[in-house]
């Protein structure tokens, strides 16, 4: 089964948007306020989309592929790897996937020069590729 979701918002990275905090002598980092706000709104929006469409699979239990396409307003540049990882965390927090460890495949892409930001997320049951069958030069 395949599920397609849309977020009409600017993404923020969980990894690159961090702030340092001190607790006694220990210093640790936490996600930025921008990422936290993005994650809360995105989680709510994704749950709403899943619940609104009865034909959508509510929760993926087994291995999945996740494709994330970032439509970028203007020429803003960012690390799409980190954005993709943040989206996987949000999918898990929203209960759409059980755990981001079940993501066996997929890809991400950014398309620059759009009028506004949005994110397309495609989730489908994982199908092993031809390279997972037999020995293809793996040492």
Image: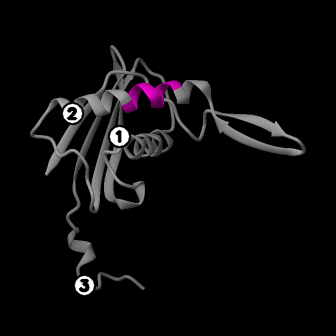
Q: Which residue is mark 3?
A: 134
- Looking at the rendered image, the disc whose residue lies closer to the viewer, 2 or 3, is 2
Q: Position of residue 16 (x, y in %)?
A: 60, 37
In the depicted structure, whether residue 85 falls above or below residue 47: below
Q: Split into 4 quadrants, where in the image is the C terminus?
A: bottom left
Residue for badge 1: 109
Residue at 36% in and 28% down: 44
Residue drawn 28% across the image and 54% down it: 65
Task: Specify the segment rendered in magenta.
Answer: 37-43
* Disc 1 from disc 2: Cα separation: 27 Å
Q: Position of residue 129 (x, y in %)?
A: 22, 68
Mark 2 lies on residue:
51
Q: Please check the rendered image and state whether residue 39 is part of the magenta-colored stretch, yes or no.
A: yes
Within 10 Å of the Cα at label 1, are there few (<14), some (14-19), or many (20+) other Cα atoms? some
Kindly state the secondary structure of the residue where label 1 is placed: strand
In the rendered image, which quarter is residue 19 located in?
Answer: top right
């Amino acid at each position: 089964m395949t599920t397609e979701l849309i977020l009409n918002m600017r993404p923020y990275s969980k990894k690159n948007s961090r702030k340092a905090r001190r607790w006694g002598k220990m210093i640790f980092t936490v996600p930025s306020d921008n990422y936290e706000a993005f994650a809360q709104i995105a989680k709510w929006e994704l749950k709403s989309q899943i619940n609104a469409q009865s034909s959508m699979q509510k929760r993926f239990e087994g291995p999945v592929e996740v494709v994330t396409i970032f439509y970028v307003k203007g020429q803003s540049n960012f690390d799409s790897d980190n954005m993709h990882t943040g989206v996987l965390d949000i999918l898990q927090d929203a209960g759409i996937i059980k755990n981001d460890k079940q993501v066996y495949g997929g890809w991400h892409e950014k398309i620059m020069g759009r009028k506004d930001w949005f994110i397309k997320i495609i989730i489908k049951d994982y199908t092993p590729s031809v390279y997972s069958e037999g020995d293809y030069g793996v040492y």
